[in-house]
Image (spheres, rainbow, N blue to C red):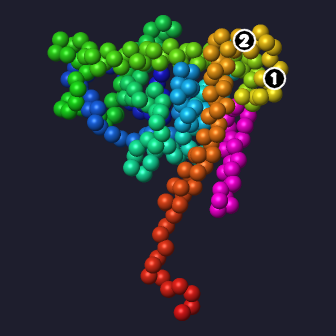
Amino acid sequence: MINENLHKKPVALDRQKHRNLKLDRNARDMTRSKGLNAFFIAAGEFAEACKDYPIVWVPAGQDPKGKAQVAPIAVFGLTAGQNLCIDAADRWRVRYVPAMLRTYPFAMARTTETELLLCIDEEWVGLSEETGEPLFKADGSPTELILGVQQQLEQLEGDIERTRRYGEMLVEKKLLREMQFDATMPDGNKIHVNGFLTIDDEQMTKLSDAELLELAKTGLLGMIHAHQISLSNMNRLAEWQLERAAAEAPMPDINKPIGNA
């Protein structure tokens, strides 16, 4: 899946055009990640992601038949363009990083319902013809690096499709509701975060035993529980926001006279 906030110049990986291209695994540029205040995660990531991030859903347009769609996201920050999960040294301060970020600069593009195309972001700073691991062998065949990435992304695409179906179930059963997160910081400032969807606990209690069994068998019930556990991480984000605000506050002028003396 191509993410427009991450993949700025995605192109199909071509054995002729990219014959001499290399990937430097040591290259680091967190500029784009630092500007992400949330990012998509797939169903298979919930169990690990819920330990580090709040997981919520957001509206994701409509399918070809006009049905509303939703997508799950891991929340990184409480305001636009803010990633509190990356520290001042440009390192992730959480243990789990979403799969699509880990496989960057590669991505899959779906050309038909059954065909996928491996792509690469040509703007990634770690790509060159001088440094790193080659993407293709001398005969033009893909290296183990590319074969491994392709396998990872194909598995991820399958998980993404499963996630879409779970979203459809949540919408059909009306199990999502709008939610706002409010917090009062020690300095008295208030934080309000809205625009996301959470599980409607009241609607959950109205499900029949057969419906609950269906959710359990499909794996969706486990995702719901992981989501509910994850919401406590909102408080940690609020604490990190306060830390960042304090770190970015201007230092007092030590040469300025105090009082009227």
- Front residue of 197/48: it is 48
Apparent side of residue 20 relative to residue 9 in the rendered image (left or right): left
- Front residue of 153/219: it is 219
Q: Residue at x 23, y 26 (%)?
A: 133
Residues marked 2 and 1 touching at CB (< 8 Å): no
In the picture, the disc for residue 239 is: none
Magenta-tinted stretch: 178-198
The secondary structure that most of the magenta stretch takes on is strand
Residue 151 seen from this side = yes
Q: Quadrant of residue 70?
A: top right
In the picture, the disc for residue 213 is: 2
Residue 15 seen from this side = no
Furthest residue in direction left, as rendered: 138
Apparent side of residue 212 relative to residue 236 in the rendered image (left or right): right
Q: Residue at x 66, y 26 (%)?
A: 225
Q: Residue at x 46, y 36 (%)?
A: 95
Give the labeled residue for mark 1: 205
**Image coords of residue 74 (percent x, y):** 56, 34
* Amino acid type, callout 2: Leu
**Image coords of residue 80 (percent x, y):** 57, 45
- Front residue of 249/18: it is 249
Q: Is residue 253 above or below residue 144?
A: below
* Amino acid type, callout 1: Thr
Furthest residue in direction top, as rendered: 114
Quarter of the image with the C terminus is: bottom right
Q: Is residue 163 above or below residue 177?
A: above
